[in-house]
Image (tube, grey):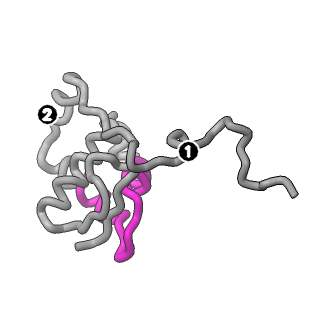
């Protein structure tokens, strides 16, 4: 019987779903930093509120939480990248509002839940 888990050498070894070697989230560009710095306090609060609304009592991938939050039309029109939302997640973890497992600097390799 042929091995059903053989990928023909296309994806194997370190290239196959190795979350430990996944790169850290990219930094914000200078233009994105300027946009983030110019955000009103109310907008930052809305972003945090939307992120918290998409976190559950069980762990959920940070990338999923961010994707769901970014679907909010109010936030979508601002044009902030996902890495800004990841920065806000890290802040919510630091403030004790979220509990994290994994590396918070790699949104696809981290999970959060309500703290």
Q: Going by the image, does 101 lie left or right of 92?
A: right
Q: Position of residue 78 (x, y in %)?
A: 31, 37
Q: Is residue 37 above or below residue 100?
A: above
Q: What secondary structure is found at the residue carrying circle 1? A: loop
Using the image, tell me which numbered label, if any, was put on residue 38. 2
Q: What secondary structure is found at the residue carrying circle 2? A: loop
Identity of the residue drawn at 62% across and 39% down: 11
The earlier-in-sequence mark between 2 and 1 is 1
| Quarter-of-image position of residue 4 | bottom right
- Image quarter where the C terminus lies is bottom left
Q: Position of residue 15 (x, y in %)?
A: 53, 39
Using the image, tell me which numbered label, if any, was put on residue 61. none
Q: Is residue 32 magenta?
A: no
What secondary structure is the stretch in magenta mostly built from?
helix
Q: Is residue 49 above or below residue 28?
A: below
Using the image, tell me which numbered label, if any, was put on residue 16. 1
Q: Is residue 66 magenta?
A: yes
- Image quarter where the N terminus lies is bottom right
């Amino acid at each position: 019987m042929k091995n059903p888990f053989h990928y023909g050498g296309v994806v194997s070894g370190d290239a196959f779903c190795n979350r430990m070697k996944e790169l850290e989230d990219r930094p914000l560009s200078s233009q994105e930093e300027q946009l983030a710095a110019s955000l009103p306090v109310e907008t930052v609060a809305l972003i945090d509120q939307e992120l918290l609304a998409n976190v559950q009592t069980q762990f959920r991938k940070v990338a999923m939480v961010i994707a769901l939050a970014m679907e909010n039309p109010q936030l979508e029109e601002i044009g902030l990248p996902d890495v800004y939302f990841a920065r806000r997640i890290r802040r919510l973890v630091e403030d004790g509002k979220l509990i994290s497992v994994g590396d918070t600097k790699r949104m696809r390799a981290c999970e959060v839940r309500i703290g």
